Image: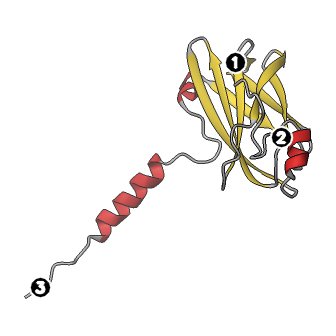
Amino acid sequence: MKKKPGFCPAFLLVLLLTMTACSGGSGQEEPLAAAGMGIELKLPDHVQSGQKAEYIVNIRKGDRPVAGAQVVVNLEMAAMDHGKNGFRAIMTEPGQYKGQAVLPMGGEWIAYVKVKKAGQEQTKKFPFKASGDMLSPHEMKAKGLNEDGALKNADF
């Protein structure tokens, strides 16, 4: 009498391939990508906790810069919650948007760049690393952060 296998290796392979094809990777664009919208984030060469850093977002549709978009950058620590941190970026020239932020500690961070333009919305994720120790409550207060590291009076 032949025993039937407890699992099917072919089924496992199909399941694995399906999961890989459906998962989004780092920096993957969402809905507006089909419309030709490209989002790039230029991080400072070195991001240090407690230091104000400038972030630059470039937005293009095809080979043209996108002007007049609403751009919000949310900064979240990958391993823990520090509340709302980030900024509403301001257009400095067509297709280029800038903003500044202070991180409460070093480690693995993710910048979520959300762009709204003409009733369409797209978010792109950019992982990055910051160096430095966690700021003391006094240092956080001096930098405009709450005791948990969140931005005081965030308007985005």
Q: Residue furthest left?
A: 1
CB under 8 Å between discs 3 and 2: no
Residue underneath mark 3:
2
**Can you give x and y, in whole percent of width and height, for residue 50 in the image?**
90, 46
Q: CA distance from mark 3 to mark 1?
A: 65 Å
Residue underneath mark 2:
43
Q: Nearer the viewer, mark 1 or mark 2?
A: 1
Of the residues shown, which amino acid type is indicated by label 2?
A: Leu
Comes first in the chain, label 3 or label 1: 3
Q: Nearer the viewer, mark 3 or mark 2?
A: 2
Which secondary structure, mark 3?
Answer: loop
Quarter-of-image position of residue 10? bottom left
Residue underneath mark 1:
70
Q: Does residue 47 appear in the picture of this structure?
A: no
Q: Would you say 97 lies left or right of 45 here?
A: left
| Quarter of the image with the C terminus in it | top right
The residue located at (72%, 21%) in the rendering is 63
Comes first in the chain, label 1 or label 2: 2
Q: CA distance from mark 3 to mark 2?
A: 61 Å
